[in-house]
Amino acid sequence: MSSEDSKTPGQPLGQVAATVLAGLKTRKLHLAVAESLTGGLLTAEFVTVAGASDVLLGGIIAYQQELKHELLGVSQALLAQVGSVDPQVAAQMAQGVRTKLAAKMGLDEALVVGVSTTGVAGPDLQDGKPVGCVFLGISSQTGDYVYELNLVGDRNSIRAQTVQHAVSALGEHFN
C-alpha cells in the first residue's frame, strides 16, 4: 500500500469510515482499535460516523512501551529487542486489543476485528526507524495482516495519512 492509496478517489474519509462500519455491521462484527502514533485519531474518525456504537467497541491508546505490554499484551522481549516500530509489534497490538475488548465485552473473539497503528511521526528517528515508517496491523478470525507504510510529510500529515491508510485497509478486508 503506497501513500497514494489512502482513500477511494472522490470519496471523503468519513464516508469510507462509514462504509467500513456498515460492512462490519453487515457481518455482525465489532471493531477494536489500538493506537500509538495516531494517539486517538483513528478511533475519532470512526466516532464521527452516526451509529458507530453499533460496531465500535472502543480504543486503547498505548503510547509508551510499558502500556503496549500491560494493556495490549505485546511481548516485553520483542519490545526490548526491536522497540515499538516493528511489524510484529503492530500485529501483537491488533491481536491484543481484539482479545482484550472481546473479553471485556463478553464477546466471542471471532466477532471482533482489531486494528493497530505504530510508527514514527517525527521529527526524529525512533528505534532506528526513519520518520514516516509506519506499521498497521489488522487481526480477525480470517487472519492477521500487517501493512508497512513509508509516508512523507510533517508530524501531523503522517498521523493523518496513517488514519487514512488504516481506514482504507479495513475497507479492503471488510467491504
Image (cartoon, grey):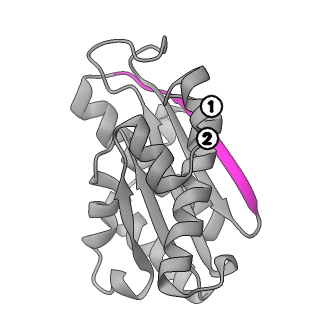
Report the front residue among 140 and 24: 140
Place of residue 60 in the rendered image (x, y in percent of width and height, measured from the top left): 37, 59
Three-letter amino acid code of the residue under disc 1: Leu
Report the front residue among 119 and 4: 119
Q: Which mark is residue 78?
A: 1
Residue depicted at 35% across the width and 84% down the height: 53
Is residue 148 inside the magenta stretch?
yes
* Residue 82 in the image: above or below residue 87: above
Is residue 6 among the parts visible in the rendering?
A: no
Residue depicted at 71% across the width and 54% down the height: 144
User: Which residue is denoted by mark 2 in the rendering?
Assistant: 75
Residue 92 horizontal side relative to residue 69, left or right: right
Quadrant of the drawing holding the N terminus: top right
Q: Main secondary structure of the magenta part?
A: strand
Indicate the secondary structure of the residue bearing disc 1.
helix
Q: Residue furthest right?
A: 142
Three-letter amino acid code of the residue under disc 2: Ser
* Residue 31 in the image: above or below residue 126: below
In 3D space, how far apart are the residues under numbered discs 1 and 2 (Cα atoms)?
5 Å
Place of residue 73 in the rendered image (x, y in percent of width and height, measured from the top left): 56, 52
Residue 15 horizontal side relative to residue 7, left or right: left
Residue depicted at 62% across the width and 57% down the height: 95
The number of numbered badges drawn on the structure is 2
Q: Look at the image and give the residue range highlighted in magenta.
A: 143-152
Place of residue 11 in the rendered image (x, y in percent of width and height, measured from the top left): 38, 60
